[in-house]
Amino acid sequence: MENTVKTVLFLGLLTGILIGIGYLFGPYGLIIGLIFAVLMNFFAYFFSDKIVLWMYQAKEVSKSEKPELHAMIEGIARIAKIPKPKVYLVKSANPNAFATGRNPKHAVVAVTTGILELLHKDELQGVLAHEISHIKNRDILIASIAATLAGIISFVGAMARWGAIFGALGGNDDDNGGGILGFLVLGIITPIMAFLIQMAISRSREYQADESAARLLGSGEGLVKALKKLEDGVKEHPMKAGGEAGASLFIVNPFSWKGFMKILSTHPATEDRVKRLQSLTF
């Protein structure tokens, strides 16, 4: 419940920033911003799953190819009371997994070859329950909306920066000084705020998926062991393909950014996730 409230507040903040930007750009700025947001959200809702699967070269695998994996996903989906997601495989030594799809009826769970080789059955079940929890909680949709809003704010911020630069080059009129400064503030500070809020939403949803997974299985022990193994495994085999844009979708950051502050991370620290899981009562 706590993480749900946080998510709503963070999405509200992103929307508020976008509305504020619209007002700054004049009476029609807000309308244009909202139309742009709706169109981008529509695109993200229907096509983000296909883009992500293409980015990481994921291929659908049949039940005959991976019967045990299919059986695990089917069993957990039944407990979660959602349709069985499609099963995809990513050929990568990076031990990881992600879920995508616009709703439970059009969902995908993808795992890497590395995670299948690294984890024991109970650990893999914990990971799959985490991904199925993302589907059940509609986190993919929430992440898509957050990314879209943050993307629009960043785009407008870039326009503002260029506007300030060209305004400065276009003349030395002292009256324009305040306007140029305003454009620079808009162009620099608002995109940073949007990025930080987006990261906070991502971390909040990871905590909630961890808890949901543990409750689905009646224990968080398998997921705890899996998270510890995955953190070490990612350091040994960081992902090389697909780019960092989809990092927030994975159960652990596949690129193992070292030295990043917690506030800049798409995922909570593994030790914090483990502590929360171990504190759950059933």
Image (tube, helix red, strand yellow):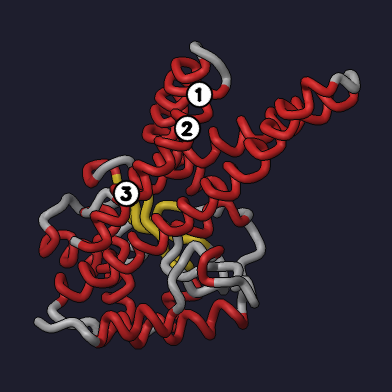
> Is label 3 in a helix, a strand or a loop?
helix
Give x and y (percent) for residue 238.
62, 72
Residue hosting label 1: 22
Give x and y (percent) for residue 41.
41, 31
Q: CA distance from mark 2 to mark 1?
A: 6 Å
Q: CA distance from mark 2 to mark 3?
A: 14 Å
Residue hosting label 2: 18
Q: Nearer the viewer, residue 14 or 121?
A: 14
The amino acid type, in three-letter code, at marker 3 is: Leu
Q: Earlier in the sequence, mark 3 or mark 1?
A: 3
> Is label 1 in a helix, a strand or a loop?
helix
User: In the displayed structure, does residue 24 sit left or right of residue 45?
Assistant: right
Give x and y (percent) for residue 242.
61, 54
At x 45% / y 63%, what residue is drawn?
Answer: 250
Instruction: State the quadrant of the C terminus.
Output: bottom left
Residue hosting label 3: 9
Check if mark 2's residue and mark 3's residue have beta carbons within 8 Å.
no
- From this viewpoint, which residue is outermost toward the top? 28
Check if mark 2's residue and mark 1's residue have beta carbons within 8 Å.
yes
At x 50% / y 12%, what residue is drawn?
Answer: 28
- From this viewpoint, which residue is outermost toward the front? 174
Give the crowd class for mark 1: few <14, some 14-19, many >=20 residues within 10 Å: some
Give the crowd class for mark 3: few <14, some 14-19, many >=20 residues within 10 Å: some
> Is label 2 in a helix, a strand or a loop?
helix
